[in-house]
Image (cartoon, grey):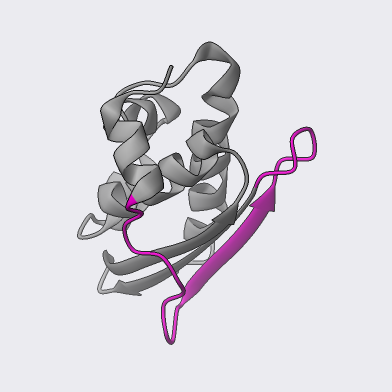
């Protein structure tokens, strides 16, 4: 039912916890299923230097949150803003059709966090 990559992110989550002295933070809840994702970022000179998450919810939600931190770590803010649900789904090796909400939650939370980052000039 779940890909090996998705199960690996669920069983061995990457970058759990919270960034100390984060300068971007967002917490989003999916009101339909109850999944919750809290994402904290440290952005220095327009680049994401650290990303951590706390989540509760279904297996795909936890895996997508973990994959998201790997996808954004080291990217510029602009590169992170360009990420889409399909990128998260690909990073976990696919999700069942009924679980695409997990990737949507990850991208929505990322977008909310990145709106707090002051654009670089």
Residue 92: percent from the left, percent from the top? Answer: 32, 32
Residue drawn at the location 44% of the way across and 29% of the way down: 85
Is residue 118 part of the magenta span, yes or no? no
Residue 56: percent from the left, percent from the top? Answer: 61, 53
> Horizontal placement of 83 versus 47: left or right?
right
Q: Is residue 108 visible?
A: yes
Of the pair 84 and 102, the residue shown nearer to us = 102
Residue drawn at the location 46% of the way across and 74% of the way down: 18
Of the pair 14 and 27, the residue shown nearer to us = 14
Residue 64: percent from the left, percent from the top? Answer: 43, 40
Residue 102, quarter of the rendered image = top right
Point out the residue furthest to the right here. Answer: 31
- Residue span colored magenta: 12-35
Of the pair 52 and 84, the residue shown nearer to us = 52
Is residue 30 part of the magenta span, yes or no? yes
Q: Quadrant of the C terminus?
A: bottom left
> Horizontal placement of 5 versus 119: left or right?
left
Residue drawn at the location 45% of the way across and 71% of the way down: 17
Magenta stretch, main secondary structure class: loop
Point out the residue furthest to the top here. Answer: 97
Of the pair 8 and 19, the residue shown nearer to us = 8
Identify whether 94 is placed above or below 69: above
Identify whether 21 is placed above or below 110: below
Q: How many marks?
A: 0
Point out the residue furthest to the left here. Answer: 74
Residue drawn at the location 40% of the way across and 23% of the way down: 2
Residue 60: percent from the left, percent from the top? Answer: 49, 34
> Horizontal placement of 4 versus 57: left or right?
left
Identify whether 35 is placed above or below 24: above
């Amino acid at each position: 039912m779940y890909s090996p990559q998705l199960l690996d992110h669920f069983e061995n989550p990457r970058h759990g916890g919270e960034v100390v002295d984060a300068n971007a933070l967002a917490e989003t809840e999916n009101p339909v299923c109850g999944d919750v994702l809290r994402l904290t970022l440290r952005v220095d000179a327009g680049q994401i230097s650290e990303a951590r998450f706390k989540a509760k919810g279904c297996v795909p939600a936890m895996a997508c949150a973990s994959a998201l931190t790997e996808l954004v770590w080291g990217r510029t803010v602009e590169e992170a803003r360009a990420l889409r649900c399909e990128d998260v789904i690909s990073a976990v090796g696919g999700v069942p059709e009924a679980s695409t909400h997990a990737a949507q939650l990850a991208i929505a939370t990322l977008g909310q966090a990145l709106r707090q980052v002051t654009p670089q000039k």
